[in-house]
């Protein structure tokens, strides 16, 4: 982490959601940029070098899981939090298996969003691995 | 024993005759007799003088042979006649050949016979020609005249000798006689008296002691005072000339004496004369025999011709049979082949055309056998392929039925019976339409098949059949068989597939719905929270509570909405059922009590006489009833009609299976006919409010319970929803 506040990339096809989250993050002292689709997200990923990515699963040109896979291949240490409007257990498990730091179900409260971002940023990679297992297990148990 | 003996003899004799007359024995006798006849004939022709003696023998022999031949011929003809009458193979041809041969033989032999008789007569007559007779007479005359000359010479010589001897005295006589004998070259000189007393003799040949005594003729002649000369055959060879001359008397008292001189005749002359004499006498004899000779020869010839003719006819029959035999075999062979016996092989004999024909026939049957074997092989192969095909068809999971162009079911594989839950093997060779009369549930399928039959095109159609375990959807493909021989119908049970597709569609619907609802909810909640967070410190404290309250409401409603969407997603995502035994009456009653609050709504529950307990998911089932009741109430209310709903449940029997039937009848506007089948599809509603998923969820849940739900319009007014559930639901 640099002295600068962390840069967060918000990827969502809904401009309202992007703007709102950006505003909230700015208020909280984070830097935030947004991308409306896969192409913009890739561009921002390579040029802006974000510290964290908030990634929507459903986008018009590409699905978030593929993008997650892609980003994780380019930078294994990249912290990515998935957002989804239809949080199924299967998708959550898939995302965390692929290295997502957290899985947020829409609609989300500000408090939950910020908590998730904070905890994700604070964790180093090893902790991320531990976190993944923690997340997977309860979901699996709850719906078995 | 005694009585048996004559019988035994009789049968023995009969068998002997039979044995002698059957087989090759007659031919053997015939051959032997013919050889004997030929021998005698050659004997007879060599020496015609013996003909007379042999004639009877030859004649008898020829008659015996003829009889034998006739018997043989009669036998052959009888056989031929019998064959002809029985229409035995080849008998007609044999008869025709035999008649031709017989005609030919009779014609040719009669011509030859005619000419032979003619030549025979002419030949024998020519032997006794006038010129030959004359020549023979002349030759005889010639030999006689030459002898006459000689005789006269000898007579003169004898007269001279008698003159000489008469001059001599008796005592010199002996000596002179000897001298004369020597001089004259006479064979014998003797002097006799008329009494027959030998006076004196001299013989040239010493071996003979006594002179030959003159015959009475000579004595007579001498007594008549005449000289005698004759040509006599000698005892040894040739002829002798005998001359007798009267000796002149010297004294009258002297007894009469005569001189006999015997001269030898010249050998050659004698031989020639003899030959001529023989020839003449032979000729005379033959001339005498001419008439009987002609008769004998004619008879012999006739006999030989008869024999030849008979033998030829017999031979003709034999040869005809021989010629026809292979044809007969061929005919029999052909008939055998025509009857289907292709293994027929005839014995080929000879290198002629018939032999070639027989070989060709054998070749043909061999080829036929080959062809038949090949045919059988290909038939077997075809059978194997059919078996193979049957096995393949049997192992197919799709049902395959073939129907011929008369609408008869020709074949059906195992899967088809399994899918339709009907033993189609019992319905083979039956009409398609009969199938539906035996199994009414198959009517939709048979209707579709019949409907497409006349089109002669491939078709594909989905058919729904009401099976005991619920509605079954079949995907049917019909393909016309080549040459308009019928149709092959292939069908698959796509119920599960459709279910899966439907589930997938549901999943997709749920996903979209979640996205479309939850996405806008996100900025709403975030905005509300942000509003409160940002502006709470800025508003006066008396209004802060209001702001907090408002934002809290927004957030709560968003949360509620999220919960609803999640619930729906859960339905769509098709989790398993939690089955338990439930009393249906109680369950319906419980749901109905929730609707009792509105006094304008009237509900009637028609209970089943017996208690019905089913293994179902109670929560899902409540959802079903809830959705159906809500749907009925809303439909009536929208049409401003009274809410009067009758719910009934009872057990029914369909196709020998027990079903639970639940009906929910309203008195609303009913359902448009074109919507009757689609109202259970998602978003097919014609109501103003509602998600359009209510009935779809009902259908989904009922199908998850292996049931069937459909809608009907009742006769008066209103609609009726009918649910059929099998009374046993398998655990999934």
Image (spheres, helix red, strand yellow):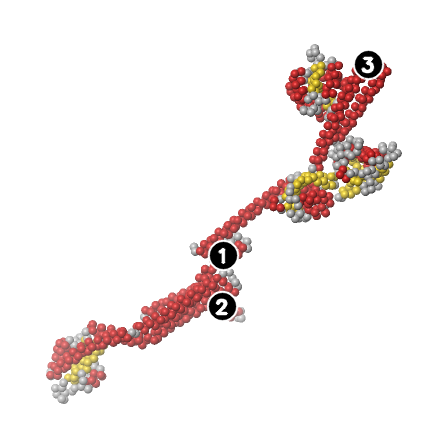
Local secondary structure at mark 3: loop
Among numbered discs 3 and 2, the one appearing first in the sequence:
2
Among numbered discs 2 and 1, the one appearing first in the sequence:
2
Q: Chain of mark 2?
A: B
Between disc 3 and disc 1, the foreground one is 3
Residue nearest the observer in this picture, B79 or A50: A50
Residue B409 spot, x, y in % from top left: 66, 46
* Residue at the image position 82 percent from the left and 22 percent from the top: B553
Identity of the residue furthest to the bottom in this view: B253
Tally the numbered discs. 3
Categorize mark 1 by other alpha carbons within 10 Å: few (<14), some (14-19), many (20+).
many
Rendered image: mark on residue B538 = 3
Local secondary structure at mark 1: helix
**Decide: marks 3, 1 in contact (CB < 8 A)?**
no
Between disc 2 and disc 1, the foreground one is 1
Is residue B85 depicted above or below A44 in this figure?
below
Rendered image: mark on residue B14 = 2
Between disc 3 and disc 2, the foreground one is 3
Categorize mark 3 by other alpha carbons within 10 Å: few (<14), some (14-19), many (20+).
few
């Amino acid at each position: 982490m640099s002295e600068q506040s962390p840069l967060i990339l918000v990827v969502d096809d809904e401009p309202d959601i992007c703007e709102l989250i950006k505003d909230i993050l700015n208020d909280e002292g984070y830097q935030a940029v947004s991308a409306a689709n896969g192409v913009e997200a890739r561009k921002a990923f390579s040029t802006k070098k974000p510290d964290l990515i908030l990634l929507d699963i459903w986008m018009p040109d590409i699905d978030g899981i593929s993008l997650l896979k892609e980003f994780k291949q380019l930078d294994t240490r990249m912290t990515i939090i998935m957002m989804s409007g239809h949080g199924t257990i299967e998708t959550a498990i898939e995302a965390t298996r692929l290295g997502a730091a957290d899985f947020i179900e829409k609609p989300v409260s500000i408090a939950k969003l910020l908590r998730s971002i904070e905890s994700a940023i604070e964790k180093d990679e090893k902790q991320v691995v531990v976190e993944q297992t923690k997340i997977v297990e309860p979901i699996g148990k709850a719906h078995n | 024993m005694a009585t048996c003996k004559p019988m035994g003899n009789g049968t023995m004799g009969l068998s002997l005759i039979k044995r002698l007359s059957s087989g090759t024995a007659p031919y053997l006798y015939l051959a032997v007799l013919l050889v004997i006849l030929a021998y005698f004939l050659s004997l007879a022709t060599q020496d015609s003088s013996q003909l007379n003696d042999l004639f009877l023998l030859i004649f008898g022999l020829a008659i015996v042979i003829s009889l034998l031949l006739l018997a043989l011929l009669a036998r052959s003809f009888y056989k031929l006649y019998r064959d002809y009458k029985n229409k035995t193979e080849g008998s007609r041809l044999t008869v025709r050949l035999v008649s031709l041969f017989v005609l030919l033989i009779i014609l040719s032999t009669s011509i030859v016979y005619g000419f032979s008789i003619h030549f025979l007569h002419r030949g024998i007559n020519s032997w006794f020609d006038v010129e030959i007779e004359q020549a023979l007479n002349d030759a005889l005359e010639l030999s006689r005249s030459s002898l006459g000359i000689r005789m006269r010479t000898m007579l003169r010589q004898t007269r001279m000798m008698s003159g000489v001897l008469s001059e001599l005295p008796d005592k010199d006589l002996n000596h002179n006689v000897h001298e004369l004998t020597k001089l004259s070259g006479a064979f014998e000189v003797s002097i006799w008296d008329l009494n027959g007393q030998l006076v004196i003799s001299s013989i040239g040949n010493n071996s003979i002691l006594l002179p030959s005594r003159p015959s009475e003729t000579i004595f007579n002649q001498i007594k008549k005072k005449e000289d005698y000369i004759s040509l006599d055959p000698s005892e040894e060879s040739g002829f002798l000339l005998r001359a007798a001359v009267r000796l002149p008397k010297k004294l009258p008292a002297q007894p009469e004496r005569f001189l006999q001189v015997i001269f030898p005749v010249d050998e050659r002359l004698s031989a020639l004369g003899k030959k001529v004499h023989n020839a003449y006498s032979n000729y005379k004899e033959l001339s005498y025999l001419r008439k009987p000779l002609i008769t004998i020869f004619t008879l012999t010839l006739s006999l030989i011709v008869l024999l030849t003719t008979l033998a030829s006819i017999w031979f003709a029959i034999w040869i005809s049979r021989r010629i026809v035999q292979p044809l007969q075999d061929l005919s029999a062979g052909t008939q055998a082949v025509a009857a289907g016996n292709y293994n027929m092989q005839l014995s080929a004999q000879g290198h002629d055309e018939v032999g070639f024909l027989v070989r060709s026939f054998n070749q043909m049957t061999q080829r036929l056998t080959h062809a038949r074997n090949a045919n059988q092989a290909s038939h077997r192969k075809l059978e194997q392929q059919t078996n193979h095909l049957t096995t393949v068809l049997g192992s197919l999971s799709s049902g395959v039925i073939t129907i011929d162009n008369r609408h008869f079911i020709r074949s059906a594989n195992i899967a088809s019976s399994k899918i339709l839950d009907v033993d189609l093997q019992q319905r083979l060779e039956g009409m398609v339409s009969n199938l539906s009369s035996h199994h009414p549930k198959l009517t939709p399928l048979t209707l579709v098949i019949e409907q497409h039959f006349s089109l002669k095109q491939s078709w594909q159609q989905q058919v729904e059949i009401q099976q005991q375990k619920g509605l079954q959807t079949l995907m049917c493909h019909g393909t016309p068989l080549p040459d308009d021989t019928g149709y092959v119908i292939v069908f698959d049970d796509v119920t599960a597939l459709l279910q899966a597709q439907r589930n997938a569609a549901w999943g997709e619907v749920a996903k979209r719905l979640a996205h479309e609802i939850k996405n806008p909810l996100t900025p709403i909640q975030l905005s509300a929270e942000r509003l409160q967070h940002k502006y709470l410190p800025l508003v006066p404290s008396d209004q802060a509570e209001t702001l907090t309250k408002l934002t809290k409401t927004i957030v709560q409603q968003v949360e509620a909405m999220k919960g609803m969407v999640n619930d729906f997603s859960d339905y769509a995502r098709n989790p398993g059922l939690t089955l338990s035994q439930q009393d249906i009456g109680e369950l319906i009653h419980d749901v109905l009590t929730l609707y009792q609050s509105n006094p304008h709504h009237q509900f009637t529950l028609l209970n089943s006489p017996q208690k019905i307990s089913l293994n179902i998911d109670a929560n899902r089932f409540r959802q079903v009833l809830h959705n159906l009741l809500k749907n009925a109430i809303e439909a009536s209310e929208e049409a401003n009609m009274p809410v009067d709903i009758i719910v009934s449940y009872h057990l029914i029997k369909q196709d020998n299976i027990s079903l639970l039937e639940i009906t929910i009848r309203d008195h609303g506007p009913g359902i448009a006919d074109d919507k009757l089948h689609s109202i259970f599809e998602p978003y097919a509603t014609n109501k103003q409010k509602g998600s359009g998923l209510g009935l779809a969820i009902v259908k989904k849940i009922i199908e998850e319970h292996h049931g069937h739900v459909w809608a009907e319009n009742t006769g008066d007014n209103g609609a009726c929803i009918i649910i059929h559930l099998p009374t046993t639901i398998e655990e999934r």
